[in-house]
């Protein structure tokens, strides 16, 4: 199937899926918002849908509340062609909610309702190991590391995927309000650092993890570990920098009219993973890697032109149109 450019390897995303409540009016505080629209979210779930939107194969592993919102989210995954055999429902806990306000500058502020939410209660025994073992790429974040039992489930899932030969992809996706402290966040995010084959951090996360306000090669390379195949630093509207064992460089961003940055990083990751899942040799070929990263940047850019993450995730033809236009 890969011959016609459609990826056939399975990309499994692990972690949280939740509902973002977004104010009907941009640029106001949560208290001032006259009303809210519900938008499905959660970075690992966004990545799973980003993959299928681009013609790839993905599955989502996580736990939702056995409530209307949980079943709605599972339905959205299925509608988008994401395999849902790895989803559990919790009878006693609710699906997580996040109230997200878009400041006037397009950046976001979060207030979370999780005490505890269903995703935090996934246990190692509940994991669908068959789905995890069939992953060519296993992708995860750090929110699932915050509390037990989900943390143990996360560690077991990574171990099972690695043993089965999957490429491990890590996007820490820092959400400081969810952690007990910044120190704990830094410690736990780094606790699984050396296991990942591909790591994507944003410029803000780079500063947070290194404790330096410099976003340069030296700062990025301080996060390098010997098993890493690719380190990416996304720079918002300035594109991204890439680092491998043998080469490093940058790819410029596309200039678009940004409405909402939600999901842009997830779209970027989904695009990258879709392009490398069947051919990991791309990670060792700078010209081909740059081409893939240009495509991923185009996908990220398109995602910022509409409100919400999932509705804004592009198809391959939309990304190619932007690439051809070079805008």
Image (cartoon, helix red, strand yellow):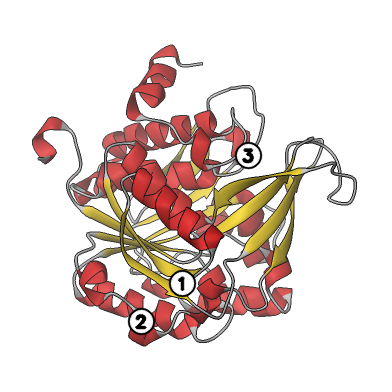
Q: Residue 175's quadrant in the figure? A: bottom right
Residue 134 location in percent, x, y?
19, 65
**Corner quadrant of residue 176:** bottom right
Residue farthest right in this picture: 32
**Can you identify the residue that label 3 sits on?**
261
Q: Secondary structure at mark 2?
A: helix
Q: Secondary structure at mark 3?
A: loop
- Regarding residue 243, the answer to whether it shows in the image is no
Residue placed farthest to the top in the image? 325
Task: Give the percent coordinates (x, y) of residue 228.
Answer: 36, 63
Of 203 and 11, the residue lying toward us: 11
Name the residue: 53% across, 25% down. Answer: 254
Residue that appears at 40% across and 23% down:
318
Q: Disc 2 designates what residue?
A: 126
List x then y, in percent, for residue 186: 63, 73
Residue labelled with disc 1 = 193
- Pointer 3: residues within 10 angstroms few (<14), some, or many (20+)? many
Which residue shows up at 73% across the image and 37% down it? 106
Q: Nearer the viewer, residue 49 or 139?
A: 49
Image point (64%, 47%), residue name: 38
Query: How many numbered marks, from 0 up?
Result: 3
Label 1 crowd bin: few (<14), some (14–19), many (20+), radius 10 Å: some
Please, what secondary structure does the residue beneath circle 1 have?
helix
Neighbourhood count class around disc 2 (C-alpha, 10 Å): few under 14, some 14–19, many 20 upward: some
Query: Is residue 248 in view from this perspective?
Result: yes
């Amino acid at each position: 199937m890969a011959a016609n450019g459609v990826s056939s390897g399975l990309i499994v995303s692990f972690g949280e899926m939740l509902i973002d409540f977004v104010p009907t009016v941009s640029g106001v505080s949560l208290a001032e918002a006259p009303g809210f629209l519900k938008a499905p979210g959660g970075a690992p779930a966004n990545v799973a849908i980003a993959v299928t939107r681009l013609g790839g194969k993905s599955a989502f592993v996580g736990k939702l509340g056995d409530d209307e919102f949980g079943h709605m989210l599972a339905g959205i995954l299925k509608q988008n062609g994401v395999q849902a055999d790895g989803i559990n429902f919790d009878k006693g806990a609710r699906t997580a909610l996040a109230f997200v306000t878009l400041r006037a500058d397009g950046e976001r502020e979060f207030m979370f309702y999780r005490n505890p939410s269903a995703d935090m209660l996934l246990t190692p025994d509940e994991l669908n190991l068959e789905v995890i073992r069939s992953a060519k790429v296993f992708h995860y974040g750090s929110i699932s590391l915050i509390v037990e039992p989900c943390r143990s489930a996360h560690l077991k899932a990574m171990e099972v995927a690695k043993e089965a030969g999957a490429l491990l992809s890590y996007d820490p996706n820092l959400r400081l309000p969810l952690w007990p402290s910044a120190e704990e966040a830094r410690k736990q995010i780094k606790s699984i650092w050396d296991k990942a084959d591909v790591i994507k951090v944003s410029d803000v996360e780079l500063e947070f993890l290194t404790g330096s306000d410099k976003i340069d090669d030296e700062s990025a390379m301080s996060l390098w570990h010997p098993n890493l195949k690719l380190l990416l630093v996304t720079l918002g509207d300035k594109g991204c920098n890439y680092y491998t064992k043998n080469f490093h460089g940058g790819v410029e961003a596309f200039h678009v009219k940004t409405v909402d940055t939600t999901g842009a990083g997830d779209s970027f990751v989904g695009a990258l993973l879709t392009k490398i899942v069947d051919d990991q040799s791309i990670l060792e070929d700078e010209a081909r890697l740059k081409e893939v990263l240009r495509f991923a940047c185009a996908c990220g850019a398109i995602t910022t032109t509409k409100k919400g993450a999932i509705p804004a995730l592009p198809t391959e033809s939309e990304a190619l149109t932007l690439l051809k236009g070079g805008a």
